[in-house]
Amino acid sequence: MAHSPEIRNEAFDLYLKGFSAPQTVAELKRRHPEAAAAGELPSVKTVGEKWPYIPDADGKTWSDRRYEAEASARTALTSDFVSLRVKMRQGLVRIHDKLLERMERAVDNAQDVDPENLEQGLYAFVNVFKTLTKEFDNSDAVEARAKDDIDTLIEAIKRTVPNFETEYRPRVLEEFKRLKAAKSQPAAQT
């Protein structure tokens, strides 16, 4: 039985959200009770064992399309994160500059300054300076991109190396641990 493209697209959207085949069919029945009553919805076998492996017009399976969607989402998230960090850094730099300017004016006009306000301004300046220093030294974004690259590499290996999960992955992880332990050892002195 041919199912409508809308039903297939809905099933794919549920697949992207992590629904299993039985959960997908149940959700489709909930959304389309008339089609369910008429027997026009796909079976669990169709959703779980057929549709995911049938290439679409572009030759892509559901796994291929999910991988592309996840990669696109990771790229967008990384871009948003970097953009937000840049905006935050720019804001902190502006605050830092204004506080520095106020502190310089306060020092120039020391006779007119309330000591309590000067102390509060000094604390604010120090805290902004500490935050800026930490922000410039922070490597979280670099680490996040490296982790994404590693995840992408592992996914590519899974897709291209037969029996990777069962046969090769344990050996790769063992070798990874050995290499990591070797790198963490201090260099032998000669």
Image (cartoon, helix red, strand yellow):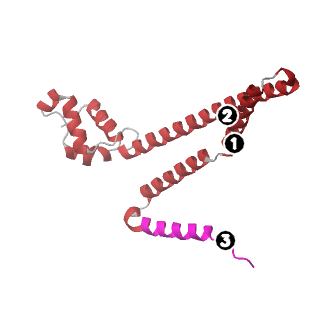
- State the extent of the magenta-drawn residues as a range: 169-190
In the rendered image, residue 180 lying in the magenta stretch gets the answer yes
Residue at left offset 47%, top offset 54% = 156
Q: Is residue 115 above or below residue 57?
A: above
Image mark for residue 136: 1
Q: Which SS does the magenta portion mostly show?
A: helix
* Kind of residue at badge 1: Phe
Circle 2: element type: helix
Where is residue 134? Give x, y as percent: 67, 43
In the rendered image, residue 39 lying in the magenta stretch gets the answer no
Image mark for residue 150: none
Where is residue 176? Give x, y as percent: 52, 66
Labels 1 and 2 touching (C-beta < 8 A): yes
Q: Residues within 10 Å of mark 2 (few under 14, many from 20)?
A: some
Circle 1: element type: helix
Q: CA distance from mark 3 to mark 1?
A: 28 Å
Q: Residues within 10 Å of mark 1 (few under 14, many from 20)?
A: few
According to the picture, the residue beneath numbered tag 2 turns out to be 89
Image mark for residue 186: 3
Asked if residue 43 can be seen in this view, the reply is yes
Q: Quadrant of residue 119?
A: top right
* Kind of residue at badge 3: Pro
* Kind of residue at badge 2: Arg
Q: Considering depth in this image, is 74 or 129 the residue closer to the camera?
A: 129
